[in-house]
Image (cartoon, rainbow, N blue to C red):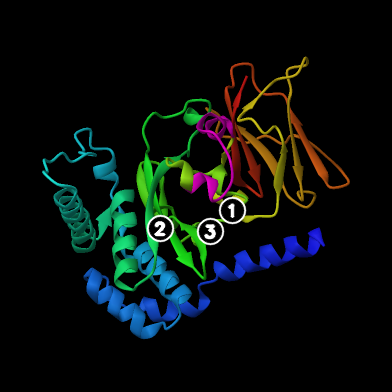
Amino acid sequence: MRLSILIFFTVFIAVAQDFSGIESKVEGYPGLLTADKLATTIKKDFPKKEDQVKALYRWLTKNIRYDLEEFYNPNRQTKTRFRYRTPEEREQKLQEIRDKTVSETLSKRRAVCEGYARTFAKVSDLMGIENEVIEGYVRNSSNSIGNPRKQPNHAWNAVKLNGKWIYIDATWGAGSESNGKWIRRFNPYYYNIPATKYFKTHLPEKSIWRLRVGRIEKEDFYKQPIYSHDFLKSNVNLVSPKSGIVKRNAKGAIKMVLTNAADKEILIGFLGSSIAQRPSVVTKGKNTTVTISPPPNANVCFLLIDREVAIEFLIN
């Protein structure tokens, strides 16, 4: 029974992240649209709510670039202060700020995460789809392992479909930074992020949005390794270490244990070295044990699967 449930869940996620029926229509949409026009166009072309949300995700990831210049601007304003006399006036001014963010995102066709998330929320509202913007934490570098942030550093969306909340990150779905440049690369993984893997990359600030998925504390979230989306999309699992800090044994070696990796090419890279090394790889049953002795001064390592970075660790 457990196996059949797992297979069903895997197939469900694969179907949910399939954009083959959406792509052709959205490809024909103009790149410059208002929120109202985008909502109207999507509703006309896609009667089902699920397809409307997929179409919105695909359009945003195709047409909005991540604004690296704004992200790295040391004078970037992340909080807006204003005065108000009543709760109604406060909400009105907040909505004006949100609408301005959406308008600028769509007119400039670039944004940081706030712009992606607010635009997703605005268009969803116009299509009559229940949604929330979630503020929280993400990690994408070994520098964050064991180093919790005090303030949220990301925003994404929760959308209610068929009575269930799904979690969507259009920012990460649009592409990623590489060597100081933003590279557009559509990634369907961040549409309906699997609940079993959600806390490996995203942690909501508000406890209500954590409890809808599971239980984890911020300190534990930051203790984890750094997982790539390519690894998370695969069926390979990390058995140990669960910590993002891998410890040398008495002989100076480090060890990792994986499942479903028997047919994979596994390499280990170390920060500061341009050449990945072949570790000892031993498979017994479902488990594949990877062992290597890092250079004495190595403090960061990368597990590569089929020559793609899969997991990042600190070395102690």
Where in the figure is residue 268, as x and y percent of width and height? 66, 35
Where in the figure is residue 271, as x and y percent of width and height? 54, 29
Who's the residue at 53% across and 25% down the image?
Answer: 146
Verify whether residue 213 appears in magenta.
yes
In the image, 272: left or right of 205? right
Residue 108, relative to residue 313: is it above or below? Answer: below
Measured in 3D between alpha carbons, the distance from the residue under mark 3 to the one under mark 2, in whole angstroms, is 10 Å
Judge by depth and name the residue closer to the eye, 119 or 60.
119
Badge 1 element: loop
Q: Residue furthest right?
A: 285
Measured in 3D between alpha carbons, the distance from the residue under mark 1 to the one under mark 2, in whole angstroms, is 17 Å
Q: Which label sits on residue 195?
A: 1
Who's the residue at 62% across and 49% down the image?
Answer: 231
Measured in 3D between alpha carbons, the distance from the residue under mark 3 to the one under mark 1, in whole angstroms, is 12 Å
Q: Nearer the viewer, mark 3 or mark 1?
A: 1
Verify whether residue 7 appears in magenta.
no
Q: Nearer the viewer, mark 1 or mark 2?
A: 1
Q: Which residue is mark 2?
A: 170
Q: Which label sits on residue 189?
A: 3
Q: Is residue 178 visible?
A: no
